[in-house]
């Protein structure tokens, strides 16, 4: 132990210089860390208060409320869409019109066949046959694309025209 104390006292100047250098280095590190902490606090305050003074917590709460409202709205719209799609299957939305001359002595395409039906092929075909002295109107029902009464070429053409709007053939004989 005596020898250790003698070594310390012989090198006390160097040891003091090393300790002073370590204290200066620690002081410099402490000042840098303080500056870094101030910068981080400033950023955190800006984050919490926002650039326009809003509170981040209030902003997040408002965002969560908006998100919940949007989710509820989406669920309601999804239910309404399903209801509309269900109703659209029975909506009479496919239509076809064929005008023609029923008789050779009549011109102007006054006679017509008009088909109107839904997604399932349920609907009607109206026909009007116009002659010189009379006009006859016929209505034939369609169920599943079929009629229980025979169809004329013009009626079948009207159904086919409506099916063209639909993208597929509908006439079932």
Image (spheres, grey):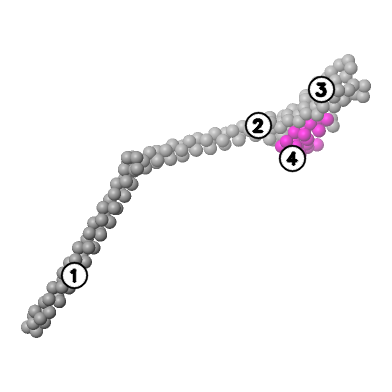
Q: Position of residue 123 (x, y in %)?
A: 72, 29
Q: Are marks 2 and 4 in contact (CB under 8 Å)?
A: no
Earlier residue among tags 4 and 3: 3
4 to 81, vertically: above or below:
below
Residue at label 4?
A: 168
Identify the residue shown where x is 46% and y is 38%: 70
Which residues fall within the magenta stretch? 154-173
In the picture as drawn, the residue positioned furthest to the right comes out as 105
In the drawing, does residue 73 fall left or right of residue 46? right
Residue drawn where x is 15% and y is 76% of the image = 14
Distance between mark 1 and mark 4 Cα atoms: 91 Å
**Dot 1 or dot 4, earlier in sequence:** 1
Position above or below: 19 against 44: below
Element type where label 4 sits in the image: loop
Quadrant location of the C terminus in the rendered image: top right
Mark 1, residue position = 21
Pick whichever of labels 2 and 4 is earlier in the sequence.
2
Question: Looking at this view, is 67 or 52 the one in front?
Answer: 52
Which residue is farthest top? Answer: 133
Label drawn at residue 90: 2
Q: Residues within 10 Å of mark 2 (few under 14, many from 20)?
A: some
Horizontal arrangement in the rendering, residue 14 relative to residue 97 (left or right):
left
Towards the viewer: 111 or 28:
28
Mark 2 and mark 1 lie on one chain; the one further toward the N terminus is 1
- Residue 83: horizontal and vertical position, in percent? 57, 34
């Amino acid at each position: 132990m005596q020898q250790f104390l003698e070594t310390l006292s012989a090198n006390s100047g160097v040891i003091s210089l090393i300790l002073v250098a370590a204290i200066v280095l620690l002081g410099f590190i402490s000042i840098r860390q303080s500056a870094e902490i101030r910068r981080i606090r400033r950023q955190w305050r800006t984050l919490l208060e926002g650039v326009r003074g809003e509170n981040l917590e209030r902003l997040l709460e408002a965002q969560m409320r908006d998100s919940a409202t949007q989710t509820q709205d989406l669920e309601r719209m999804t239910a309404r869409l399903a209801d509309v799609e269900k109703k659209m299957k029975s909506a009479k939305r496919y239509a076809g019109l064929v005008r023609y001359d029923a008789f050779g002595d009549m011109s102007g395409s006054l006679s017509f066949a008009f088909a109107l039906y839904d997604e399932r092929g349920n609907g009607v075909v109206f026909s009007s046959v116009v002659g010189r002295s009379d006009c006859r109107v016929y209505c034939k029902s369609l169920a599943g694309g079929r009629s229980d009464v025979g169809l004329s070429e013009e009626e079948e053409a009207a159904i086919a025209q409506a099916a063209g709007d639909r993208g597929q053939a509908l006439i079932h004989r």
